Amino acid sequence: PGKDTFEQIEVMHMIPDHGKSGIICVPLLPHDRTTTRLLAANIRKLERRGHPIIQLDNFIPEYSGSCIMTDHKKSAAGMMEVLHNYGHRKTALLYRNANKPSVKLRINGVKEWYNENGIPLTNLIKINADTVRIDSDAITALIESGVTAVFGLECELVRDLYIRLERMGYEVPRDLSMCSFDDHCFSGLRSNFITSIVQRCDAIGYYAVQLLLDMIEGKTQGALEMRLEADIKIRKSVAKI
């Protein structure tokens, strides 16, 4: 819990020393490394106090601990393969929170796919929504540049882009194909329409609890990392070229 990193650290200070317990932590990572190191230091304090810890869905770069998450690199590369098979040769990669480890892994997965398939990275237009305003002029310029598909690394970005495209009179996928990492924020849009990478959240949670119980009981020791494959749901928001 916690609305930001500092509040999450405050919650950690409230955890009592007595009793035999483990912790599942979804790290709230800041933009600056100093605060990230502070978060890592407090996680290590909890470990020294006898609390086994599992990081869920994300991980703290400055802390070498157990983590269970989606295989973000493989999933992102898989989506690029789908777009390529559908004939898309000039794609825009839309993202924000580039400092977030899971987002970094997704970006690296896309880049590695291009390198492994011998396709120039000049065919990939990277758009960082933290530094570039996605307004009507930017969208028009993107389409006129020959981009035929947008892969959004967070579904909120895809939702906002879809709504803006509709307001501008563009049609998905006639004018622009769209796909997303995650699909949990598409309520209110066309049902089961956006092609998405769907994380197996139930399985991630299940294995996190199973591993944590093993650590509490002393059956498992040391840091472990588990990355689960996600499902790619191909829907009508991506058209063949």
Image (cartoon, grey):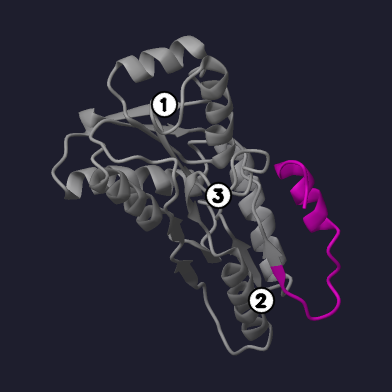
- Asked whether 141 or 86 is in front, the reply is 86
Q: Amino acid at mark 2?
A: Val
- Asked whether 6 or 147 is in front, the reply is 147
Contact between labelled residues 3 and 1, with CB atoms less than 8 Å apart? no
Q: Amino acid at mark 1?
A: Ile
- Asked whether 26 or 197 is in front, the reply is 197
Contact between labelled residues 2 and 3, with CB atoms less than 8 Å apart? no
Location of mark 1 (residue): 127
Q: Amino acid at mark 3?
A: Asn
Of marks 1 and 3, the one in the foreground: 3
State the residue at coordinates (86%, 58%). 14
Horizontal and vertical percent position of residue 116: 18, 50
Q: CA distance from mark 3 to mark 2?
A: 30 Å
State the residue at coordinates (53%, 27%). 161
Q: Please tell me whether mark 3 sits on a helix, a strand or a loop.
A: loop
Q: Is residue 145 magenta?
A: no
Of marks 2 and 1, the one in the foreground: 1
Q: Taking 168 as reference, is 130 above or below it?
A: below
Q: Is residue 14 magenta?
A: yes
Horizontal and vertical percent position of residue 15: 83, 64
The answer to which of marks 3 and 2 sits earlier in the sequence is 3
Location of mark 2 (residue): 209
Binning the other alpha carbons within 10 Å of mark 2 as few (below 14), some (14 to 19) or many (20 upward) gives some
Q: Please tell me whether mark 2 sits on a helix, a strand or a loop.
A: helix
State the residue at coordinates (58%, 34%). 159
Q: Which residues are magenta?
A: 1-23
Location of mark 3 (residue): 192
- Asked whether 184 or 28 is in front, the reply is 184
The answer to which of marks 2 and 1 sits earlier in the sequence is 1
Q: CA distance from mark 1 to mark 3?
A: 25 Å
Q: Which quarter of the picture shows residue 74?
A: bottom left
